[in-house]
Image: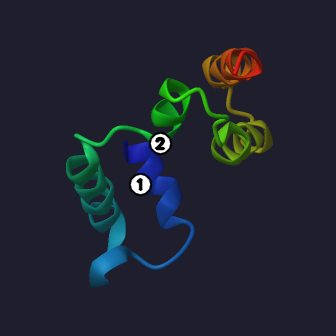
Amino acid sequence: MAYIAHHSRECGQAPNGGSGLDAWLALVWGVIEKTANNKASMLQDVEAKRLTERGAILGPLIESAKRHGVGCEVLRGLDGELAVLEESF
């Protein structure tokens, strides 16, 4: 979580008029708390046997990991599994 907040901070000014890492952490935790009971749209798509937006959602994450030299084998594996699943729809 601190990693996400740290890298989000590099993208611009702190949210809500705050400053530093604490403002970013508060924003990230706020989003987590407000969306904790939501059902992910990708899960809704899979349950309805619709193609997902995996390319738009996972693609940029995988590309960013590659650019930053961060391993994302699990994410790549999930992307592959979703591709196979979507072929059955």
Write the residue at 54% across / 27% down. Answer: 46
Report which residue position mark 1 lands on. Answer: 5
Report which residue position mark 2 lands on. Answer: 41
Write the residue at 27% across / 49% down. Answer: 35
Write the residue at 35% across / 75% down. Answer: 15
Give the number of callouts. 2
Q: Is residue 72 left or right of residue 12?
A: right
Crowd band around label 2 with a 10 angstrom C-alpha radius: few (<14), some (14–19), many (20+): few
Give the CA distance from mark 2 to mark 1: 24 Å
Mark 2 is on which residue type?
Ser
Mark 1 is on which residue type?
Ala
Crowd band around label 1 with a 10 angstrom C-alpha radius: few (<14), some (14–19), many (20+): many
Q: Quadrant of the N terminus?
A: top left
Disc number placed over residue 36 in the picture, else none? none
Q: In this picture, is 20 found above or below 43?
A: below
Viewer-nearest residue: 37 or 50: 50
Considering only order in the chain, which callout, 1 or 2, is on the residue closer to the N terminus?
1
Can you give x and y, in whole percent of width and height, for residue 74 in the image? Answer: 61, 17
- Secondary structure of the residue carrying numbered label 2: helix
Q: In this picture, is 15 found above or below 43?
A: below
Viewer-nearest residue: 44 or 28: 44
Q: In this picture, is 18 found above or below 62?
A: below
Q: Quadrant of residue 19?
A: bottom left
Q: Quadrant of the C terminus?
A: top right
- Secondary structure of the residue carrying numbered label 1: helix
Viewer-nearest residue: 59 or 45: 45
